Image (spheres, grey):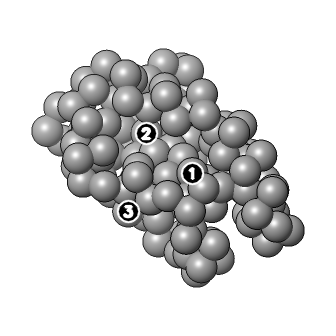
Amino acid sequence: MPDAQPSTAYRCGQLYATLHVLCSVGTGDRKLDRQESRDKVLKRPEDNLKPPLREAAQYLIKARRRGADHGKAADELFRAIADFIPVNGKLPTSLGEGEKGEFTKGFHQQMAEYAPTHGRLMT
């Protein structure tokens, strides 16, 4: 039996974690990890995921300017964005309560995956 694909909400959580880490590696700013930022994404995912998606290339450029380790990490993160875009290419406009839980699980799972290799580069 094939593995079940992650839900759209879970993928959006992974996407948000990836954008947060990319922003942090590029700028040293952890603004996307603030609770109020995450709450906004949970309320209106499409509206609040699009701005950091548009800024991703700038985060990549800034990370490369910070040095080789930052640049290598940013390259990996930038490429990973495509893995977390929902399969249909549409970001949800809202999330139900269960979907908010899935988003949060995806976010925390992805953050745990990045922590060992990228944590030290995020400041």
Question: In 3D space, how far apart are the residues under numbered discs 1 and 3 (Cα atoms)?
Answer: 17 Å
- 86 vs 77, left or right, is left
Determine which residue is flagged by label 3: 108
Q: Nearer the viewer, mark 1 or mark 3?
A: 1
Q: Residue 95 at what x, y percent from top left? A: 23, 30
Q: Are marks 1 and 3 in contact (CB under 8 Å)?
A: no
Instruction: Measure the alpha-carbon separation of dots 2 and 1.
Output: 16 Å
Looking at marks 2 and 1 on the same chain, the residue that comes earlier in the sequence is marked by: 2
Instruction: Find numbered disc 3 in the image and state the secondary structure of the residue it sits on.
Output: helix
Query: Height in image: 53 above or below 5?
Result: above
Q: Position of residue 8 (x, y in %)?
A: 41, 34
Judge by depth and name the residue closer to the eye, 7 or 107: 107
Percent coordinates x, y for residue 50 in the rendering: 49, 26
- Give the labeled residue for mark 1: 23
Above or below, 50 against 27 in this view is above
For disc 3, the neighbor class at 10 Å (few under 14, some 14 to 19, many from 20) is: some
Residue identified by numbered label 2: 12
* Label whose residue precedes the other's in the sequence (3 or 2): 2
Find the distance from the CA under tag 3 to the CA under tag 2.
12 Å
Give the total of numbered labels: 3
Instruction: Give the position of the C terminus as an image quadrant.
Output: bottom right
Given the image, on which type of amino acid does mark 1 rest? Cys
Q: Residue 72's quadrant in the figure?
A: bottom right
C-beta proximity under 8 Å, tags 2 and 1: no
Q: Earlier in the sequence, mark 1 or mark 3?
A: 1
Which residue, as the protein is rendered here, is positioned at the far left? 97
**Residue 114 appears in view:** no
Going by the numbered disc 3, the residue's amino acid type is His
Task: Please name the residue shown 37% across and 56% down the image.
Answer: 33
Callout 1: 10 Å neighbours few (<14), some, many (20+)?
many
